Amino acid sequence: MNPQESTVNATRQSHKLSKWRQCALGIALSIAAVGSLQAASFKCKDARTAVEQLICSTPELSGLDSTLAEAYRGQASGASRQLQRRWIAEVRDQCSDAACLAHAYKVRIADLQGAKAGFDCKKASSSVENLICESNMLRYADGELNRAFQNVIQTGIDTKTHLAEQRQWVQSERDVCSTEQCLQSAYGQRTKQLEDQYNGHIETVKTKLGYSKQNDFSDIQLWPGEKNRIIALFAAQPETSNPSTGDGDFDVDIYIVDRTSLKVISHTVSSAASDAIALRGIRISPTNYSTVLGVPSFGVNLGHSHIGCASYEGSSMELYAEVNRKLTKVLAPITVSGSASMCGNVEENSGCLEGNSSDRHLEFGASKGKGLPDITVRATRLDEDGTFDTAKKTCTSVKTQKTYLLHFDGAAYKVPEGLDY
């Protein structure tokens, strides 16, 4: 199976899996990380070293830095934080040019993510696919191309053309390669082309809508579970934000448009917090929440981070629904995963750092007629004090678990204090 076919099949399987999960009332939904963040994981206004300045001035490196932050977030234990700091000092900061940095980032990301190809390597059926599966970097490249292709397809714009182009690329570009170098080049060029097409679709929609703000983040996607409506999201800092610090909440414009004509069906304006813990990405969720909420609805995933002596990485989600024929934010942001490390209190040679991590899963109850179902949030938190448990041969940690029940009051869900971080 070639990557294009596996991309389409993976998307279909994902939709089938989502539908299966959501049709079973009360079953847990684990929210995916934001992914594809569009800025570096640190505030570029604070960039002091030549390496940080190069990352901020190079779009590819900024994107790789955010991708790395996302990959690292899922493994942020005390030991992994120590390893990440060593990688920054001993690998990343030793680079003097963009090519060195790009390679260093890709290797580190592949290491953290497990470098999965966009197709099942157990079913590799050609010499080219076997070559891809045998190479850590080629598996990573295939996975990145798969991600870029899905972004384009999920816009719902020119779908047949994009499918045909991908098949042609596989046959005439990828499958004629016989070396890793050839494949690296082919994948790099194709991924860049797909990213340009996705950005081109965003610009087309912006022009059609007359959206003229200088937005920092954007995304467009077919309304999950529907064929005729597109969701367009644009996030921009207002002119009232503090230019000297880069702090300030983002205005988030969400448009619902007709897929064929791109005419506006509805429009709402919300906000996304960004202060010391800065907004690093915002994307429309591919999950079909309409099935579990019982009304047309969709989710938005957000990523926040702060990089420094004390650092934080987190993913949160919010829900929008059509209530009484009006598009409304019915669930304010809930942090579904996060990790923080503290300054000091590092036990020498143990790799243990003081910090904590949290993970939350949402379960949707049965529909309540005209009202939206209750949401159960099961939260797990792991606290590490930076010491090493010699008996267990692991960093000392304490796990706590809590359960929250969210009710819909006719306008929105009431979110208890503590779930927003």
Image (cartoon, helix red, strand yellow):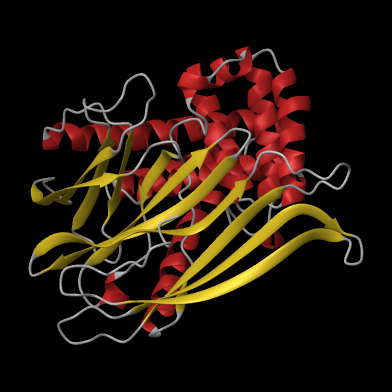
Q: Is residue 99 visible?
A: yes
Residue shown at the point (43%, 79%) measured from the top left: 20
Q: Position of residue 239 (x, y in %)?
A: 21, 25
Residue shown at the point (83%, 45%) measured from the top left: 347
Q: Position of residue 281 (x, y in %)?
A: 41, 41
Q: Quadrant of residue 202?
A: top left
Is the residue 129 above or below the residue 367 in the image? above
Is the residue 287 above or below the residue 150 in the image? below
Q: In front: 135, or 373?
A: 373
Is the residue 230 above or below the residue 362 in the image? above
Q: Position of residue 395 (x, y in %)?
A: 80, 57
Q: Is residue 33 left or right of residue 341?
A: left
Q: Quadrant of the C terminus?
A: bottom left
The image shows a total of numbered marks equal to 0
Q: Quadrant of the N terminus?
A: bottom right
Q: Is residue 78 left or right of residue 229?
A: right
Q: Is residue 131 left or right of residue 7?
A: right
Residue shown at the point (54%, 19%) measured from the top left: 47
Q: In front: 283, or 99?
A: 283
Q: Position of residue 175 (x, y in %)?
A: 61, 41
Q: Is residue 405 left or right of residue 322?
A: right
Q: Quadrant of residue 210?
A: top left
Is the residue 362 above or below the residue 71 in the image? below
Q: Quadrant of residue 136?
A: top right
Q: In front: 1, or 227?
A: 227
